[in-house]
């Protein structure tokens, strides 16, 4: 208290409370909004082998092959034609064929609905196209499957287009090439799909009787009824690196045989080692490789001598 009767508090007793925060109080933060730049989807692809991130445009310019690891992503049927056939020589055939629904199949979605959805999504009428063109100046008949359409399953239209490609080659006395990628027969069509195995194989038998070559190109994946029929009947069987090739899946085989499968089972490399595949060819080298075989078969010597190549 001062001489006038007023109370006072020394400054040094209150300054610490004013200048220093309590020892155990929580700091307060102001909320800040961070805006992320929108990155469009579909610009990049990740390699499943190396983990490399590849700009999708660069991948497409490299025919869907990862530059460093060499991993082969799927290639649609039209780009496959561009890869193999000389520019300006391709003529597509049998475009008017359409799948029927002989079983009136219904499930979570009807077969007719599935066909309509995949036609809209892919721009294709079915899972294979066929036509004629030239490969480095040599006329060929070509059929290509496209996995985007119902897993490239083989129904009546796919089987008919492949058969017609073979028969057209036989009639014109030229080689036939079939590029396969399929999960097998299309069971929405029942026995009609299974009959395509016999029909395509019979057409190839007539083609062989005419001493004309058939080149089977196996891409990832080629399985089941397709592999059990025309895909395994080539005079030359070529495969892309890493392609999965077989009939039933490995899990089904292991459960049936009660045996552990060897490492790399049902890959192109494994089947090359065991004699089913004649050669593994990187995608960008496929046209040049097939051309060399076409020239070899041109004089018919391989067929007449009964050799496979």
Image: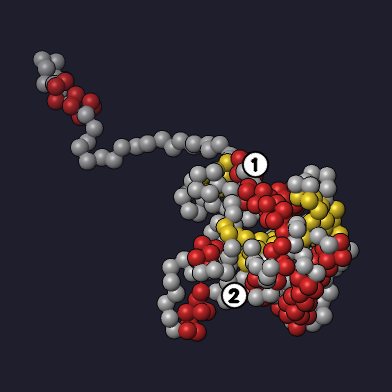
**x, y (%) of residue 3?**
10, 15
Residue 228 sits in quarter: bottom right
Farthest-out residue, right? 96
Q: Tell me if mark 1 has few (under 14), some (14-19) or many (20+) residues whose alpha carbon lies within 10 angstroms of its own.
A: few
How far separated are the C-alphas under marks 1 and 2? Answer: 32 Å
- The residue located at (43%, 81%) in the rendering is 259
The reply to whether residue 173 is visible in this rendering is yes
User: 250 or 273, which is in the foreground?
Assistant: 273
**x, y (%) of residue 167?**
83, 68
Residue carrying label 2:
247
Please tell me whether mark 2 sits on a helix, a strand or a loop.
loop
**x, y (%) of residue 217?**
66, 61
- The residue located at (72%, 55%) in the rendering is 294
User: 110 or 283, which is in the foreground?
Assistant: 283
User: Total number of numbered labels?
Assistant: 2
Residue 174 sits in quarter: bottom right
Residue carrying label 1:
61
**x, y (%) of residue 205?**
76, 74
């Amino acid at each position: 208290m001062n001489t006038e009767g007023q109370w006072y508090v020394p400054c040094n007793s209150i300054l610490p409370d004013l200048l220093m925060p309590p020892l155990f109080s929580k700091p307060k933060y102001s909320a800040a909004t961070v805006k992320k730049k929108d990155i469009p989807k579909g610009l990049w692809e990740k390699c499943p082998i190396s983990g490399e991130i590849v700009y999708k445009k660069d991948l497409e310019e490299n025919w869907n092959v990862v530059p460093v690891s060499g991993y082969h992503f799927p290639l649609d049927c039209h780009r496959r034609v561009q890869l193999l056939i000389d520019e300006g020589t391709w003529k597509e055939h049998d475009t008017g064929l359409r799948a029927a629904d002989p079983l009136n199949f219904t499930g979570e979605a009807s077969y007719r609905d599935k066909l309509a959805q995949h036609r809209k999504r892919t721009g294709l009428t079915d899972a294979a196209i066929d036509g004629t063109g030239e490969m480095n100046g040599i006329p060929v008949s070509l059929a290509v499957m496209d996995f985007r359409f119902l897993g490239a399953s083989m129904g009546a239209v796919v089987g008919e287009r492949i058969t017609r490609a073979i028969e057209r080659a036989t009639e014109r006395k030229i080689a036939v090439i079939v590029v396969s990628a399929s999960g097998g027969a299309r069971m929405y069509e029942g026995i009609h799909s299974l009959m395509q195995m016999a029909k395509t194989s019979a057409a190839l038998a007539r083609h062989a009787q005419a001493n004309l070559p058939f080149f089977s190109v196996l891409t990832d994946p080629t399985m089941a009824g397709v592999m059990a029929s025309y895909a395994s009947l080539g005079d030359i069987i070529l495969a892309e690196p890493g392609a999965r090739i077989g009939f039933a899946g490995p899990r089904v085989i292991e459960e049936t045989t009660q045996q552990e499968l060897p490492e790399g089972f049902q890959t192109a490399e494994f089947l090359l080692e065991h004699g089913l595949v004649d050669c593994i060819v990187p995608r960008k080298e496929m046209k040049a490789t097939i051309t060399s075989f076409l020239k070899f078969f041109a004089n018919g010597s391989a067929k007449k001598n009964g050799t496979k190549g």
